[in-house]
Amino acid sequence: APDAMRRTKLGASRSGDTADAPALAKAAEQVKAGWQALAADNLVEAKAQFAAAEELDSWSGAVVGIAAVLERDGRRDDAIELLAACAARPLREAATRSTACARLGAMLVQAGRAQEALKALVEGGRRNPGNAEILASLGRTYQALEKLPEAYASFAASLLGLADQPEVKALRDEIASTMRSSTKAKCQACAGK
């Protein structure tokens, strides 16, 4: 791993913590370029852009991008470790920390570690109450844990914070349908006794 990624992963502090306005602007451009490169499936360019941004501004969202590169590169455990550290440290924007927390939750669920995801997302929600991204990830985690009422409530709360989430709305509606069917089946079983 390049030095910037290694230092970020280990949480080392650099002079970027007190970066000036031009350096911050350059770092923001590099983060944007990193996401564009990642969207184009150019992992080498994405990694280079995120690492350069992290060098300029260690409080930027570059670390979330580095984790995305690691995940795409098949290094989910490294990405999880990096996002866990990121979700616990100060970042320039609260939205970046929320994104880190939500992505961490999703990766933990995909890795079969839903209980860990739940703990991370509850903590993230405590730090940033009402964040739609965290609430949606929390809903998916509850769904993986088969806690449907909690999943429904999390999806519904996420939609209150940000209504334009078709996937979250579909998940909420699917859970509502499942819970109605389950309740109806239980009522019919009780009536047959």
Image: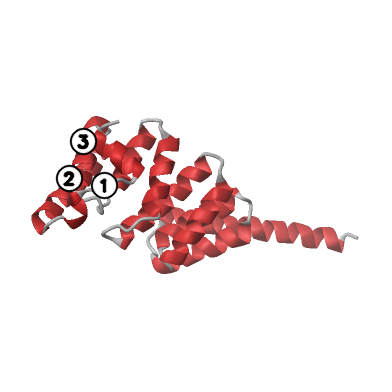
Where the N terminus falls, by quadrant? top left
How much space separates mark 1 and mark 3, taking CA atoms?
10 Å
In the picture as drawn, the residue positioned furthest to the right comes out as: 193
Query: Residue 131: percent from the left, percent from the top?
Result: 41, 64
In the displayed structure, 51 sits above or below 143; it is: above
Label 2 neighbourhood size at 10 Å, few (<14), some (14-19), many (20+)?
Answer: many
The residue pinned by badge 3 equals: 48
Residue 62, label in figure: 1
Residue at the (44%, 60%) spot, across then down = 124
Residue at the (25%, 34%) spot, across then down = 3
Could you say which quadrant of the image residue 82 lies in?
top left
Q: On the rendered structure, is 148 left or right of 40? A: right
- Secondary element under disc 1, as helix, strand or loop, is helix
Query: Residue 2: percent from the left, percent from the top?
Result: 26, 32
Query: Residue 132: percent from the left, percent from the top?
Result: 41, 62
Q: Earlier in the sequence, mark 1 or mark 2?
A: 2
The residue pinned by badge 2 equals: 30
